[in-house]
Amino acid sequence: MKSRSKPDQHNDLDQPQSAAPAASLSLSRRHFSLASLTSLAAASSVLAACTTTGTETPQNKPQVAPPPVARNPRPIRVGLALGGGAARGFAHIGVIKALEARNIQVDLITGTSAGSVVAALYASGLNGFAINKLALTMDEASISDWAMPFRTRGILQGIALQNFLNTTLHDRPIEKMAKPLGVVSTDLQTGQPILFQRGNTGIAVRASCSIPSIFEPVKIGGHEYVDGGLVSPVPASFAKKMGADFVIAVDISARPETASTLSQFDVLMQTFTIMGQSIKTYELEKYADVVIRPSLNAMSSSDFTQRNAAILAGEEAGARAAAEIERKLAAARAA
């Protein structure tokens, strides 16, 4: 009998040896695959980064600031307040000429006493040069009317001044002026100020100029009125009341220590100046944005012969103040 061959134990023993290289190959392949995937992922990340860097997305798009919106300047109503001072009032004409030379527009005008005369002429539409010409050709006698026989309430009636203005302005009432006009006077009974904005221009100005004891009081609507300088020497507050946002005030009054007191009229005007100092200071500080003070120390309030010198002094003072006015107006419009 043939002997049965024994199972090949060598083969059984070799099985694990042949499996080890296969497992090693499998691990090697798996390792290669993971490494490849890792490399591909890294490459993809790099490519993605490059792509992201070169492409603007809503998240990383540069933000461009919008251009600033230009603001329109705020409209500013400019008021001109002309103070009292008798013959020194010719200086107001020079100030107006200086403002016009710099194209500084005035929207409304108020006036007291002598200032109301120039205010009425300017509000009517006359420019500074036209008023200048009128002032230099005006006959003083045409606005002086002696109350004959002398009355106890004033030596001048003031009707001549009233007629001169109404004739010059063709009887135009206050409310029909080219620019809004306010004329300041004083109620003789109550002592309260009154601002005329309607009615007969000549009568209102006459009332505003009626210096007590020099001019007779003016009766209007059952009330008697006298010079507006008693209550508002420079009517800046009334310019505000009329709607001005910016007030240019012109103070032609003399300082008490420099004023002439040679005549009876000068003494009376000095009395007015002394009484009105505190009122004027308060009103100008509170309501005026710019105050123009022409140099008139050498001029008497009663000297109508120096009208040309007063006009020149006003023009010089207005020119000096022009830069300040323009600067403050620009700031007000930009506010």
Image: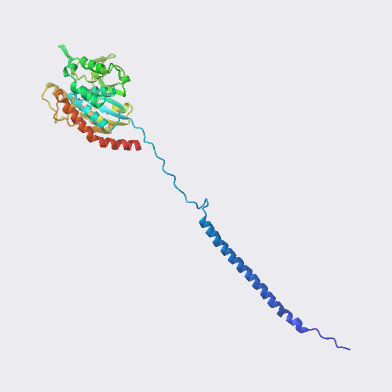
On the image, the x and y values in percent for residue 108 come to 30, 26
Q: Quadrant of residue 107?
A: top left
Q: Above or below — where is 194 with respect to 334?
A: above
Task: Out of 6 and 33, give the one closest to the viewer.
Answer: 33
Decide if residue 142 is in sight here.
yes
Q: Is residue 50 above or below residue 156?
A: below
In the rendered image of this protein, does residue 286 appear above or below residue 184?
below
Tell which residue pokes out farthest to the left in this image: 262
> x%, y% of residue 25?
67, 74
At 23% from the left edge and 15% from the top edge, which residue is drawn?
163
Residue 264 as seen in the image, left or right of residue 315:
left
The N terminus, quarter of image: bottom right
Q: Quadrant of residue 229?
A: top left
Residue at 56 percent of width and 61 percent of height:
45
Task: Locate the C terminus and report the quarter of the image it occupies.
Answer: top left
Residue farthest to the top, as pictured: 149
What colour scheme does the image use?
rainbow
Report which quarter residue 155 is drawn in.
Answer: top left
Residue that sits furthest to the right in the current view: 1
Count every numbered label the image shows and give the total: 0
| Whether residue 151 can be seen here | no
Q: Residue 17 placed where, x, y %?
A: 71, 80
Q: Is residue 332 left or right of residue 57?
A: left
Q: In this orientation, which residue lies closer to the viewer: 271 or 97?
A: 97
Please state the horizontal and vertical placement of residue 5, each as a whole percent of the image: 83, 86
The residue nearer to you, when weighing 80 against 278, is 80
